[in-house]
Amino acid sequence: MIIFRLPDLGEGLSEAEIVRWHVKVGDSVTVDQPMVSVETAKAVVEVPSPVSGIIRILHGAAGDRIETGAPLIEFAGAEPGSSPEENADHGSVVGLMPSSADEFASTVGGARTAPANAQRIQAVPAARALARSLGVDLSALSGSGRAGLITLEDVIAAGLPAAENDAPHGSTMRPAIPATDNGAVQPLRSLRRAMAQSMAMARDSVMECTVLDDADLHQWHSGNDYTVRVLRAIAKAQLVEPGLNAWYDASSHSRRVFDNVDVGLAVDTPDGLLVPVIRDVGRRSSEQLRAELERLKISAVNRTVKSDELRGFTFMLSNFGMMAGRYATPVVVPPAVAILGTGRARSDVVAISGRVEIHQRMPLSLTFDHRVVTGGEAVRFLGAIIRDLELSQ
């Protein structure tokens, strides 16, 4: 018998949700045959078989959440290509990837491996970030997750005020919630859970500042593509102030400034927020940018966007004005250091050379991490965006 455990799918997450099984007990499968579709916090991923054999046991049904490293499938009569020992544990099918239970020291240039003799603290990434902000010592905690994994709830409990921790056994001092029969409790799943963790991390680790202004679009010809023009303007602004197209590593007090502009575009979906990445914006034509935008939006809504298309953005864009809203304070998600929000363009009354005119204007909101970006750099970057947007084409 061979036990196949849910591998770390490269998302750095502690679990995934089963969407649907492609096999059933008793089926014969071959190596690389798709067995199950699972939903991570970012995408739906098909997990292929690591062996040829017969399905003996399926752990979980559609809708169940499986922790990384937990048994997923058991095979009988398996042939992995070499002679495995009985009860072998084939826990990875997507390559050699670090487990989310391992502790890593991230740098802007990649991963920094701990010394071989260093003790690894098992904690999910969100718990590690929250522990840093609360001053909680992870080594002093006993994790409630699988194999002692420290969860977000463990850190929250450890960081509660002393008055609450000293409450009589069986009681708490949490604010009372009015009793009501209205509404239904909806546990946060997949995208919404990931968004909650990401926003909590951003709140605790970024010193945000936002500057606001408007771009006058009066010179535009008909047929201009708003989002494509904004992407082009971001690429032009990066040439003026490269420091906003960067990652910041607080642990080493260093930043990595990029030449390529890879823009993460926030896409609103029924399941929550996804941020697919448009690569190398500065070197693409308007037609190429529009085609890529459409492809990524459709993939995001259908949850077919690939995992590598959701990673590695160097700058962020939220064009919330397509729905409603004029100005905002968009949130920077580390390690990026800046995000631009574009509000709804509308006709404004403006004074031009002593006379009143009506011009179409686009509101812009630029949030930046003030730990690494100065106010001067931010407003020069925003000014460069405005200058490019105000060109006729």
Image (cartoon, rainbow, N blue to C red):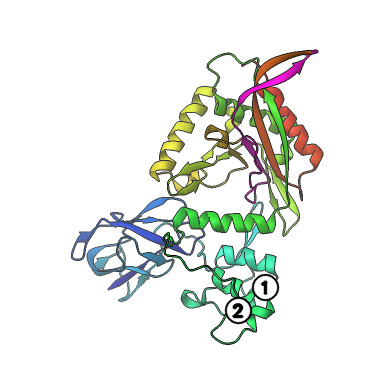
Q: Which mark is residue 136?
A: 1
Tags 2 and 1 touching, CB below 8 Å: yes
Nearer-N-terminus badge (2/1):
1
Residue 99 image offset from top left, x and y in percent? 50, 65
Residue 374 image offset from top left, x and y in percent? 80, 43
The one nearer the camera, 217 or 312, is 217
Asked if the stretch drawn in magenta spans residue 253, the answer is no
Residue 77 image offset from top left, x and y in percent? 22, 69
The vertical placement of 186 against 288, above or below, is: below
The vertical placement of 146 against 256, above or below, is: below
Going by the numbered disc 1, the residue's amino acid type is Val
Query: Dot 2 corresponds to which residue?
Result: 141
The vertical placement of 154 against 192, above or below, is: below
Within-10-Å neighbours for mark 2: few <14, some 14–19, many 20+: some
Residue 41 seen in the current view:
no
Residue 40, quarter of the rendered image? bottom left
